[in-house]
Amino acid sequence: MKAVILLLRMVRTITPMLKRQLLFIGSSLGISMVLTYFFGFLIGIAINIAIFLGIIFYIRKKQMNGLKSFGFSDEKIGGGYTNSGTRLRYICLSCASEVSGSKCRRCGSKMKKPVF
Ligand SMILES: [Zn+2]
């Protein structure tokens, strides 16, 4: 019985979100049908595809925002960024060997360039 109540509560919290998305998709489908009616088949389909892509991007963005509010993707993106920053390699400009510190170990030159 408790599981059922929990499930119902979950459904109740999820449903408004789903309803909004479904409403959004439904209304845009209606709009695209009207557009097809007015502009003819080919232009209508082109507009449909544009609208559809727009919806997908919209939902993606919403979901990204949702994840961000949970503290998910932000951290992940930041972590990936700093990781690639520390993984950046440098090559000595005068002898072309890999530089790991602030200056070249082989020739002592401080001139280096990043390698991507
Ligand atoms: Zn060097």
Image: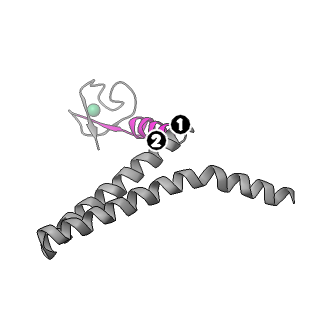
Q: Amino acid at mark 2?
A: Asn
Give the percent coordinates (x, y) of residue 66: 51, 43
User: Would the CB of label 1 be found within 8 Å of ligand 1?
Assistant: no
Other-residue count near label 1 (Cα within 10 Å), few / some / many at <14 / 14–19 / ≥20:
few
Picture quadrant where residue 41 is located: bottom left
Q: Nearer the viewer, residue 50 or 38?
A: 38
* Above or below 39: residue 57: above
- In magenta stretch: residue 80: yes
Q: CA distance from mark 1 to mark 2?
A: 6 Å
Q: Amino acid at mark 1?
A: Ser
Q: Residue furthest right?
A: 1
Quarter of the image that includes the N terminus: bottom right
Give the percent coordinates (x, y) of residue 31: 27, 62
Is 30 situated left or right of 61 in this image?
Answer: left
Q: Which residues are magenta?
A: 74-92
Is 46 situated left or right of 23 in this image?
Answer: left
Q: Ligand 1 shows up in which quadrant of the image? A: top left
Residue denoted by label 1: 69
Residue denoted by label 2: 65
Q: Which residue is at a point 45% across and 56% down the rendered structure image?
A: 21
- In magenta stretch: residue 34: no
Give the percent coordinates (x, y) of residue 57: 34, 53
Quarter of the image that includes the C terminus: top left
Callout 1: SS? helix
Q: Which residue is at a point 26% across and 59% down the rendered structure image?
A: 51
